[in-house]
Image: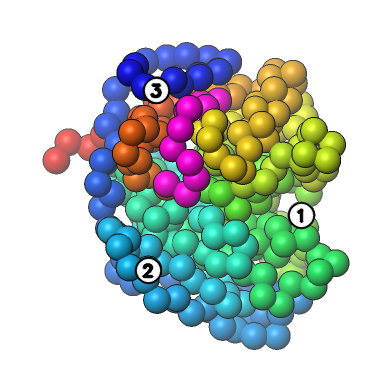
Amino acid sequence: MRHQTAVYCCTTLAVFLFSAPQSPTRVHAGDNARVMVWPEYAPGETSLDEGTNQPHRPGEIPPVTRTIKIRRPTIDVFPADQPNGTAILVLPGGGFGKVVPDKEGSEVAPWLNQFGISTFVLRYRTNEVTPETEPAWRRPLQDTQRALRLIRTRAAEWRVKADRLGVLAFSAGGQVGSILHTAEGKPAYNAIDSVDEQSCSPGFSLLIYPWNVYDPSTDGLLPEIKPSKTSPPAFIVHTHDDRSSSLGSVLIYAALKRHNIPAELHVYENGGHGYGMRAVAGSQIGTWPDRAGEWLRLRGLAEPPVQQ
């Protein structure tokens, strides 16, 4: 592969052919159902503000939405036309100060829907009012756990099988997803109603360039990320040139391997950070959805693409 090196570390390998869109299909969440995560106020909140979109930045094609000041988290629902029972909750990135619900959210939906996978994009709370003593990931983690429980509660309505619900998490969402992946189902908030009787653990995780999960002061993972023998299977993607070091992804994979948890790691030489599903000039990083499609198929979570 000219001018490009890719490192593929995996516990299993299979070859299936799927094609990821090179130009993502723009999906507008306004065309789909939006569901409130909490019945009223989220834990610790006094506002029901669903957030404000910042102005689009010049030159971004397609444009990227950045939502700030989210105090009431929501889920955008993108059901598959031919659901196979698998569902994925998408956790966008945004550095916790904002959420990117399209580039790292709704653009995933057409790709997953073609495999029969219904897609749920979470707009979790941002950190404008988070106290300095509280980790930035805590409220997004609470929202994620509640969202998983809510989807399981409404599984029959959305034609989802509760044991086939996973997460796909980008960047800061990937940090949340990494903590969630190893939390062993322990909730980060007190139960408030019958929804919270459901499991808040994912059945599998796709962690895409998880942000700042490596702690250089200890040369290890963040202390909240503790892979164990009960962790679910994982698919992990990073780039070698990402300033949010790929060492974090490598360490997550290594820990899962030590516990004999099925996992697959792809480290591409270049591509940077924040690409979502979009291609990057001079990099092969835009092929990661092909590898993820193979992994989902390998685990029996994806049907072949629907013929148009």
Frontmost of labels 2 and 1 is 2
Q: Which of marks 2 and 3 is nearer the N terminus?
A: 3
- Residue 156 shows up from this direction: no
Frontmost of labels 3 and 1 is 3
Q: Give the range drawn in magenta.
A: 265-275
- CB within 8 Å, label 2 to label 3: no
In space, the residues marked 2 and 1 are separated at their CA atoms by 37 Å
Circle 1 packing at 10 Å, graded few (<14), some (14-19), many (20+), is some
Q: What residue do we see at 44% from left, 37% from top? A: 271
Circle 3 packing at 10 Å, graded few (<14), some (14-19), many (20+), is few
Q: Which quadrant holds residue 70? A: bottom right
The image shows residue 3 at horizontal and vertical percentages of 37, 22
**Label 3 amino acid?**
Gln
Secondary structure at badge 3 equals loop
Specify whether 199 is left or right of 18: right
In space, the residues marked 3 and 1 are separated at their CA atoms by 42 Å
Return the mark for residue 57. 2
Q: Mark 3 points at which residue?
A: 4
In space, the residues marked 2 and 3 are separated at their CA atoms by 30 Å
Q: What residue do we see at 67% from left, 75% from top? A: 128
Q: Name the residue under label 1.
A: 187
The image shows residue 148 at horizontal and vertical percentages of 59, 54
Secondary structure at badge 1 equals loop
**Label 1 amino acid?**
Pro
Return the mark for residue 44. none
Secondary structure at badge 2 equals loop
Of the pair 200 and 106, the residue shown nearer to us: 106
Q: Which of marks 3 and 1 is nearer the N terminus?
A: 3
Q: Does the magenta stretch include residue 300?
A: no
